[in-house]
Structure formats: structure tokens, C-alpha cells
Image (cartoon, coloured by chain):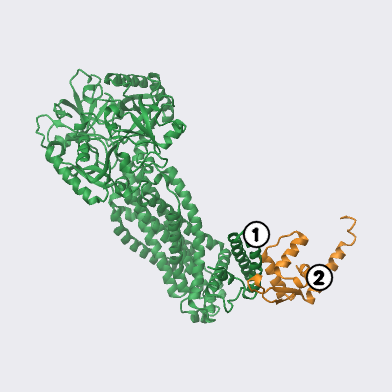
Chain colours: A orange, B green
Amino acid sequence: MLLAILRLEDEAYAVAVREEILRCTGRDVSRGSVYITLDRLETKGYLRSWLADPTPERGGRAKRYYALRPRAVQALKESRRALVALWKGLETKLA
Amino acid sequence: MTWKTLLRLLPGDLREPIAGDLEEEYRVRRSRDGSGRAAWWLWCQTLRIAITFRWERVSRGHPLPPIGDEIRTTYMWDSLRQDLVFGARLLTRQPGFTAVAVLALALGIGATTAIFSIVDSVLWRPLPYPHAGDIVMIGEQRPREGRLNGPVAPADFLDWRAMGHSFSAMASATDFALNLTGDVEPQRLRALAASPAFFDALGVTPSKGRAFRPEEEDPGRSHVAILTDGLWRAAFGSRPDIVGAKVLLNAEPYEVVGVLPPGFWWTSRPDVIVPRAFGPEERLLRSLHMFPVVARLGPGVSLGQARAEMDTIGRQLADRYPEENRYHFPQVTPVRDVLVGDIRQPLLLLLGAVGFVLLIACANVSTLLVARATARRREIAVRLTLGAARGRLVRQLLTESALLAAVGGGLGILLAAWLVWIAGHLLPPRLLALPGLSHVVIDLRVLAAAGFATTAASVVFGLVPAYTASGNHAASALAEGGRSGTPGAGTRRVRSALVVAELALSLVLLVGAALLAVSFRRLVDVNPGFDAANLTTMRVTLPQAKYADHSRTTQFFESLLTRVRGIAGIESASVVTLLPFSGADQRSAFRVEGRSSESPVPVRARPIAVSPDYLRTMRIPVVRGRPLTSRDADGAAEVVVISASAARRFWPNEDPVGRRISFEFGKPRWLEIVGIAGDVKDRSLDADAEPAAYLSYLQTAVVGSTRAMSVVVRTTLPVDAAAPLLRTAVAELDKDQPVGPVRPMMDLIAESVAPTRLNFGLLAVFAVVALLLTAEGLYGVMAYIVTQRSHEIGIRIALGASRGMVMAMMLRDAGGMTLAGIGIGTGGALLLSRSLATLLFGVSATDPLVYIAVVAVLGVVSLAAVAIPSARAARVDPLTALRES
């Protein structure tokens, strides 16, 4: 989820995040769980969000955009470091 | 509800962006899939997201708060869900309590639903005819014999039909049996001989072909038949060209003119219907009462108007034919009343009884809940003190009981479905012939009833504990501090009252069940007047075409009897036209030589044609004179043996032997009475034996047609062994001759007492369930009181009370409740026993022995239920009890 938001840069709102996950991983996650995860991550301080201006194709409703807070970037880095460490030496076995 | 209202279910902070996202996708979908599907998608998605969200936040421990603009319903929904989750958690934490409560409710609700579905099908659901309320049966009431709705004589029926203007159709309908032979497998069919107007009276139209035409009532043109859908499928493989085809019925060709629609129902469940033809002699018969009449009220005619008209017609006929018609009158009754007749009251009784079981179950669960609520007094007190509204607390406690009721109700419906299925397989055929009973279903109406029972139950058993628990004693509960303390006197009174109610209701049920049990026992013990053990019966109906001649018929049965008597294991064999308990019914008026036709009582008897050793085979005693013998054949003096009740009734102070009677009125054919036989019950064990006249079937001029006879054999062979031997004996004489089912006489008698047995059986089951529930309730209360009072008991023992004194104290408490329950219950049972009186046989509804026995049983069970907790109280260790408190 965090990676998808990072990839989307300024365009990260719920619909786009869901599509990005689908495009990259092939996994179709339900809308409800996308909203819940975004909500949860925001509560935990990993994300910040803001409302954009309302647009007519959305029935005059605003989009909520999300972006990573430094804590999330830090967490991603740590997760990547751990993964890389665990992967080290396994390349030949799983090639 | 609009989508915008639905959106309110979403958390307020995310509502706007989620709605925007959904609307964005909705527009794309609308242009692609059309607005209907897109809107459906929008609704489903919104609901899904809302539900996911709410669960998520609750499970994280942050239930969505009622935010400023949240509408009230959302708040209610939230708090309801909270209550449900909380209640479910409590219930799973106390599996024992939950299991007992759910089981009690499932039994109560299941049994109520099952009985309701049966009662509904039989009593309240409309009969399967259009405007069924306009269909009536017309019978003959004979006030002097206390008989209502008796069968009708042909001439009376024809007169009614010609004179009555209140009816749009009037038809006779006689049940009989026919042999189907020819290209199909020979079989015996249930048949109905009905006037052509029968179908108009019922409002039924054949699904293929046509109904009967009026002229098909004439003997020469009556060889047409209408098949039921079932017979058409089973015997004729649904062949499409059946209309117009010829079939062999009783070896005579009949043209099939129609097939009835699949749902057709008539009480005797016939396979085939043929026109009832009236020969010229039969059209004049007024003394032989043979068939029921069914009619449909004309448009705009009320039941009262029809009755008034038929009364007038009855009086006119009585004036015109005083000898035959003076003492009987037409009686118009709605068809359902006739069909349901004597079963209505037992069914309603069962419904009432099962309602009692449900009440007991509710009271039981209620006592359990009161106990639990008392244990939660501190929790509730804290919540009240912190500002919880009393209504809110009551709602929470009610939600918990509703949850219990819902689980119990769900299981109850499953139980009901199973019970109804069992009923469909176990009910005796006589009961299955009732309207609706052959296809009782659990449908919306029944489910609605079950839902109502469940809701009512949850309110009934939930309200008392909810109010007692949330009562205004928060401060006292808190003031008691850490002490577990004894429950308030109020709570204990409520629980005691509930247990007393349970005891009283159980007692009423037990008395009902015991009275019916005694009735059943007495009924089964009634001597039918013959020795039914080791008797096997078989009905044989010879076709008229092949056996038109009386002598051929007699010859056939004589040869059959000779063969059957030769079978090893068969002691004796004979034939009879009207076999007791076979449902065959016929009565005929007769004249006594030397008496004027004037008589204070109707001179009427069942003419029964028998083979000479019938009385010996049945072991019916000959109390005077001699039995019929093989010498009483054609050419010899014509004789008759009458039954003892006929002798008592018609020759009260004289000896009938040697007197002469005649069943024919125009030119009398005098029969000399040569003997008096013992009385035989032939319709039901609880009715008095009717006067009977045994005629020798060898005197063909006297008895007329004897083509339909029951073979009755006294044998030590089991019925399974005897049946093939009897069938073979018939087949050796005539390979095309089908036979009816071979049945032990005991089965026929058992069938006649089946309704009583069913009442008693069901009521007994209910009573036992009620007793168990009551015992459990009593046990629960006492066990609880012992726990609550262990501190006090400890002090008493420490101060020198003996264990016996403690036990006596506990038993006194329980004894008070039991006595109160028994007192109230006895009063209730005495009041209600009146409604039971007509169902009883050989026992009074206020039989003191029954009451004493029931009270004793209830007393012993109560004692057993309180003995364990009381013994535990006596074993309380004062040190432990005082230290724990």
C-alpha cells in the first residue's frame, strides 16, 4: 500500500491506489479494505492526507489524496533492508 | 432509502471522498452497463464498504462515535450491534447456561410451530377448492338416535335435488372400491361414485377431457370414468391419449372421459371417479341410508337461507312419507366442519398444551436470566450510577434475551420441520385423510407464527429480569460493597413466582396427559365383542360383469373358503359383508311381524351377510338360540340371528327367538329369528354396539348381492406368512381377481383408536418435557439460593444448627413453592378439564385418583430436583463459607 502511494506521487487517492496494486501485483483488493488500510495507516502516523477541490465528475465531491510521512519512508527503508539481508545468498537457490 | 441516506453509514470523516470515488466509478459504469446495473453496483459497494468499516472500527475497540450529523437510526444501529456483540460474548462465555436456555426455547418454539402448522393446515387453511366456503354437506340428522349427518337415502337425495333452489349443484358421493384389470397390472382402486354435479359442487374442472354429463347418471350410460392425476401417471404412464381410451373396471369397459388436475383432493383420496347411477328401484329407496351429499350454495345464498329451505323440504317429505321420513331431517353443514368434525377440539387442545410448554420454557429461561442478572447487579449498578439510562439498560438486557430467543427459534424451526416430517410419516391414514394433513408445510404463515412465538417469548422471559435487574436499587447494590450478599427479596420473589407458575402449568399438562392416558388404556381394554387376536382379514370384490349371478358369487366364496381352510395353520375361515372396524357402514330399517309400523324407537339394524361359521371364527358368543348353519341356504326356511342390543332394544320384555322380521317393506319377506349373538363394536371402541342382524349369505334371495366380502381367518400364522397363501388361494380360483390389502384385525382396531393414541401420545410428550423443564427450573432456583445463602448457612451451622435443620430449612423453602404451584395448578386443571371432558372415555375429568397420582409425581420430581442443592447446603463448611464472604 505504501509503495503504491509512493509510486503514484501526487495522484495517490483510494481509487488510484487500488488500481496501482492491481496493476503491479495482479491482486484485486476490495474497496472497503483499501479505505480501511488507508484510514489505519493515517491513524498510526504513516500517512498524511488532504482534500482536493471538488470536481463535477465526482458529483461535486472532493478527492482525498494521501502522501507518505517520514515515518513511513523510514519503515519502508527498514523493511527493504531486512528483505535484502534475508535474500542475500539465496539468489542461486531460487534462480 | 436514498443513496445519500445510505452514505450516512460511512464514517463522517471519510464519507465525502469515498462517496466521490464511488460516484466517479459509477459514472463510468453507467455509460458502459446502463444506469440500472450501475446503480445496483453503487448500492452494493456503499453497503459493503460501510459494513467493513464499522466492523473494523469496532474490532479495533474504537466504535464509530455518533458524529454530529449522524442520524438517529445510525446511532441505534450502532448501539444495537454493540448490544448484540456484547450479548453474544456473554452467551459464549457461559456455554452451560446458554445450552440449557437455547434447548428449552428450541423445544418450546419447535413444538409450538409444528403443532401450529398442523392445526393451520387442518382447521384454517382454505380447502383446495374455489370459494370453498360455499361448499356444504347435507346429511340426515336423526335426533332420536342422537345422530347428526348420517348418510342419505337415494330417494331423499333425488327429492332434495329436485326441490331445493338454494344450491347451484348437489351431488351424492359414495366411497367404494374397484378392480382395475386389462392391459395394466391388476390392482384395487379407491373409487368414488359421484353424481355428475359433483365437480360443479366442488368447483373442480378436469385438466384433460371433460366432467360427467347429467345423462351419465342413467344406468345404461354410466360406464365412463374420470381418473385422478396420480392414477393416470402411475397406472397409465401418463399416456397422452388416455381421454377416450377404454379401461376395465370390475371387468367392465369404462370410457375415460377426463383426468383431474394434480392437486385434486377429496377426503377418501379416490383414484378414480365414476358416475353414481340410480336404477329405477333404487330411485324409490327411502329406508336404506347410503351416502353423503355434497352441494354448493347458489350465488348470494347464505347458509341460513339454505338451512331454512332444507328444513321446509324435510317437513314436506316427512308429511308425504311418514313411515320412512318422519324421524329424520336434512342437515346442512359447511364441508370443513364435517371433514374436520371430531378432530377440531383435540387439535385446539394440543395447540393449547403446546402453548403451555412454550410458556414453561419461557418461565424457565426467565428464572435463569433473573439469576444471571442478579449476579450482574454490580455491573448494572455501576453503569446506572455512571449515568446510563434505565431504558438503555433494559434494551441491552432485552437484546440478550432476543439473541437467545433467535438462536432457540432458529433451532426450533428446524425441530418443527423435523416433527412435521415425522407426523407425515407416522400419522394413521384416517388422520391423513383430513384436509391439509397429507401436505402440512412450514411456509410463510407458519414461519410468521414461529417468529411471533419467538418474539413473544423473548419479551416474556426477558422483560421480567430486565426490569428487576435495572430496578432502582443501584445504591444498595453498591453499598453492599464487595459482599456477594443475598439477593434482594424482590428478586427472589420474582424467581419463586416463576417457578410456581412453571409448576402450575406442568401440573395442568400432566393432569391432561394422565386423563388421556387412562382413557386410552380403558379404550384399548374395551372388549369389542369378539376375539381380535389371531384374526387376519382380506377384502375381495368380485366384478359384476363376471359374477352377475348370485349363485356364482356364492360358489366362488365357498370354493375360496374350502381352499383357505385347507391351509396348514388356519383354524377357521369365513366371509362377511360388513367387517367390524373396516369402515363399512350400512343400516336398514325393518318391520316386526305383528307390530304396526308405529314404534317409539327407530327400528333399524345393520344387515350383515355372513358365511355360516362367521360367529365361530370371530368367537362371537351365541347367547340364545342357535347360530347360522350351512343348512340355512336357499330353499330352507329364511332365518336371521340378531344381536343382543337389537333384542334388548326392539323386544325389551319378550323373547325375540321365533319372531319374524322383514327388511323389505312393500311385500314383506319374513325372516325367522333363530338366535341371539353377543354385541360387537364395529365402528369405534367408545361407541355403543349398534343393533345387528346376521343373515346367511347362502340365502341369496334374502341377502342379494354379496360380491364385496371380507375374508376373515383365524390363524396362528403371522400376517406376512398368511398373506401370500390367501392371495394364492384367490388367484387359483380366478387369476384376474385382485384382492385388497391383507391386514390383521388388530391393526383395524388400532387404527380406530389412533386419534386418541395420538392425542395422548403428544400430550404425554409435552407433559414430560414440561416436567423436565420445571424440575430444571426448580433445581436452578434452589441451587442458586444455596449459593447465595452459603454465608448465612455457614453462620447458622457455626452457631450450632444441625445439618438436618439446614436441609429442612431449604426443603421448606422449596416445599412452599411446590405447594403453591400444585395448589394453583390443581385449580387450573379443574377449570380446564371441562374442555377435555368430551375426549375422555371411561374416566371423569375430575377423577381424584388421577389428580392424586399427578400431584404425587410432581411432588417426587420436585423433591428430587431440590434434594441435591439442599444436601449441598447441609454440607456447607462454616469455616469456608465465612472465610469466603
Residue B553, above or below B847 = above
Label 2, label 1: how far apart the Cα atoms are? 39 Å
Q: Secondary structure at mark 1?
A: helix
The chain letter under disc 2 is A
Are there few (<14), some (14-19), or many (20+) residues within 10 Å of tag 1?
few
Residue B711 vs residue A69: left or right?
A: left
Quarter of image, res B534: top left
Residue B22, above or below B601 = below
Question: Which residue is disc 2 drawn over?
Answer: A76
Quadrant for the N terminus of chain A in the image: bottom right
Q: Position of residue B557 (x, y in %)?
A: 32, 22
- Marker count (numbered): 2
Front in this rendered view, residue B398 or B771: B398
Tag shown at residue B32: 1
Q: Position of residue B40 (x, y in %)?
A: 59, 61
Front in this rendered view, residue B504 or B317: B317
Quarter of image, res B630: top left
Residue B386 vs residue B590: left or right?
A: right
Residue B453 vs residue B484: left or right?
A: left
Residue projecting furthest to the top: B635
Residue B546, above or below B767 = above
State whether residue B788 appears in this view.
no
Q: Secondary structure at mark 2?
A: helix
Quarter of image, res B294: top left
